[in-house]
Amino acid sequence: MNETLSRLVDSGVVAVLRGVPADQLIGITEALREGGVTAVEITADTPDVAEKLGEVAGSFDDEVVVGTGTVLDSETARTTLMAGAEFVVSPSLHEDVIKTCNRYGAVTAPGVMTPTEAIRGYEAGADFVKVFPAKTVGPDHLGAMKGPLGQIPMMPTGGVSPDNAADYIDAGAFAVGAGGALVDYDAAERGDYEVITETAREFTRVVEEARGGD
């Protein structure tokens, strides 16, 4: 297995950070790391995303695997990879993004909703697929796709919370992606990063237990 993909598996939870103010980014990432979430996806529509990717990648070395999300074209993929992103995620299927990531040896995942999209993305060279938005279809849908497509690693994102993360793992997800249910931006603004750490601990505990851990 690719080392970056292995690190995403180890984390079990990928934190999706969108529009995070520069002065909160390191604090939020550290809070997530303290809670066991060691994979962070900074969305490409975040202001100064390249600079922020470089800052996080440089601040945590090998402690946190850093990627970029909401990537819709190959130019954005290349720009963020050059800035330090180790993986690239899209909300939809863009074969030019997959091709660019393959060229640079970076892990990539398109957003998919159907078996047809999942197999198209995987055949194009994706390392895994993001089932998105997961909340509109639920764990049963992911499980139904895993039936005939067991060879494709799947990660649900969109509406995943500590209350349903175990259901997605049970359905066959290798990890889950989470944004608002994981990162309390109001707490970060107050400087109360322990709130984020506690939520991260809860997420990782649920995922580990669903995987059969202690």
Image: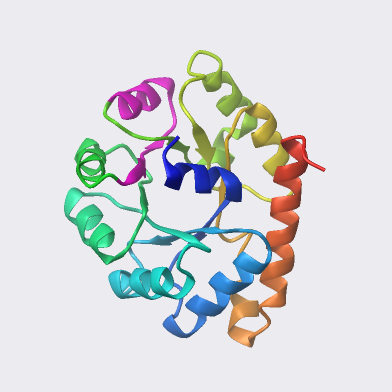
* Residue 122 horizontal side relative to residue 41, left or right: left
Task: In the displayed orientation, state which residue is furthest to the top.
Answer: 148
Position of the N terminus by quadrant: top left
Is there any visible trace of residue 34 in the rendered image? yes
- Is 208 magenta? The answer is no
**Region rendered in magenta:** 106-123
Q: Which x, y percent locates residue 156? A: 54, 40
Q: Residue at x 45, y 75 (%)?
A: 59
Name the quadrant containing residue 146.
Answer: top right
Of the pair 166 and 102, the residue shown nearer to us: 102
In the rendered image, the vertical position of residue 212 relative to residue 19, given as above or below = above
Q: Which x, y percent locates residue 136? A: 55, 38
Look at the image and name its color scheme: rainbow
- Is 112 magenta? The answer is yes
Position of the C terminus by quadrant: top right
Q: Residue at x 33, y 64 (%)?
A: 45
